[in-house]
Image: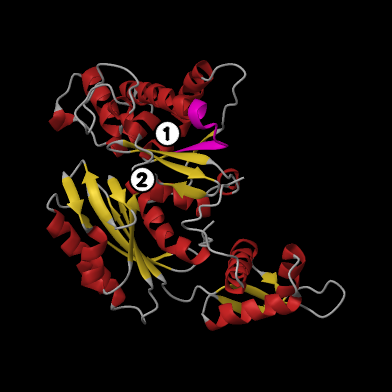
Amino acid sequence: MRRINLKKAQAARLGTIRDINRQIVLNYVREREPISRAEIARETALQRSTISTIVDSLQREGLVEEIGEGESTGGRRPTMLRLRTAGPIGIGVAINPTLTTVATNDLAGRVLEEREFATELDSQKTLGRVIDCINSLLSRTDGTVEAIGVSLPGLVDPETGTAIYVPYFKWRDLPVAEAISAGTGLPVIVDNDANSMALAELWFGRPEVTYARDFIMVLVAEGVGTGIVFDGQIYRGKRGAAGEFGHMITGTHAPVPCSCGNYDCWEAFSSERASIARYKKLCSIGDSEAPHFKELIDRALGGEEHARTAIVETALCLGVGISNLIVGFSPEAVVVGGEIARAWSLIESALRETIEHSVRRGLPSAPILPSTLGDQPTLRGALSLVLATKFAATVAA
């Protein structure tokens, strides 16, 4: 049970109850479509009149539509409902170390149109191009876009939309939300990439994840980040600083320095950069001959011995950190995301071997699952920041 925070609590007035019921009905349509009013009433035990009032409101808002009659179960044929996905309702911006992607999405989370460009180290140049892309996409809509979600590979204060520190670019205290909102005229939600991906897993992942109340998303990229979901919501901590487990100490003399400069952090052993460093050492090659991580995965899947060795060694180190998370949090599941998830057939046994060795007998373990967000996971995360404003419960407790 959760202690009520009297500083933030809202009394359960009639409007509060109405808002909760509205979110319940909207989510039933989202997850069970096509569905009838009668079926929603049976599932929720709400009055048919209440359901009809809520559905009428959702139709006026353009969120739900009728799609014809369903099969009869003995009486009149029911009128079926589904989400109305006729046009864009949000824009997602995924700023990654090498590539930035900007895309519109509909209410179901489908990408409708996108732009991409090489990310500049200069923050003003990157944000300027982001704003240009957003305005280009907005010019092709009918004013239906309501908000913008931005995913960043670093420490973010989600309350202010400020990038506190993005290691790869050395951006500090950058008012991302303020700048993009000023340039587009729309509200902007900003979070780090691991949190955004955890949110996307919550909304779009496999059933073992979407129905889990507590799980951890481990994102392997230039660094290693974690998104923590407690009780069906992202745990961000003070100023969004929760989840920085890439900096926990897991060994010494890592193959590359962490973004903080140390050689003993989990990130220094388990990131994409660590895999490439291992491969370079195994092959006795320099930076100019080293493949990008995506190509390294392709080589490993193609059977190249040194590539497979580098990836498996990274997975063993990744498993050490995941073991610590399992022991510390006892989540229902751990999801591994990023390009490395493509090599699941190569790394699964290495991960499980490390975790089974590290999680002591008698303590509960957790299933380790590859992300199913596809080849643009951080974009899905950015889009989810907008969708969560539609579907997530927002009543304070």
**Badge 2: few (under 14), some or many (20 or more) residues near its Cα, within 10 Å?**
few
User: SS at mark 2?
Assistant: helix
Give the percent coordinates (x, y) of residue 91: 35, 66
The residue singled out by tag 1 in the image is 343
Query: In this picture, is 182 found above or below 297?
Result: below
The residue singled out by tag 2 in the image is 238
Disc 2 marks a residue whose amino acid type is Lys
User: SS at mark 1?
Assistant: helix
Residue at image x 41%, y 72%? 88
Can the viewer see residue 116?
no
Residue at image x 58%, y 80%? 57
Observer-side mark, 2 or 1, equals 2
Write down the quadrant of residue 309 in the picture: top left
Which of the two discs, 2 and 1, labels the residue nearer the N terminus? 2
Give the percent coordinates (x, y) of residue 184: 25, 72
Asked if the stretch drawn in magenta spans residue 355, the answer is: no
Quadrant location, the N terminus? top right
- Between 327 and 280, the one lying in front of the other is 327
Give the percent coordinates (x, y) of residue 387: 46, 63
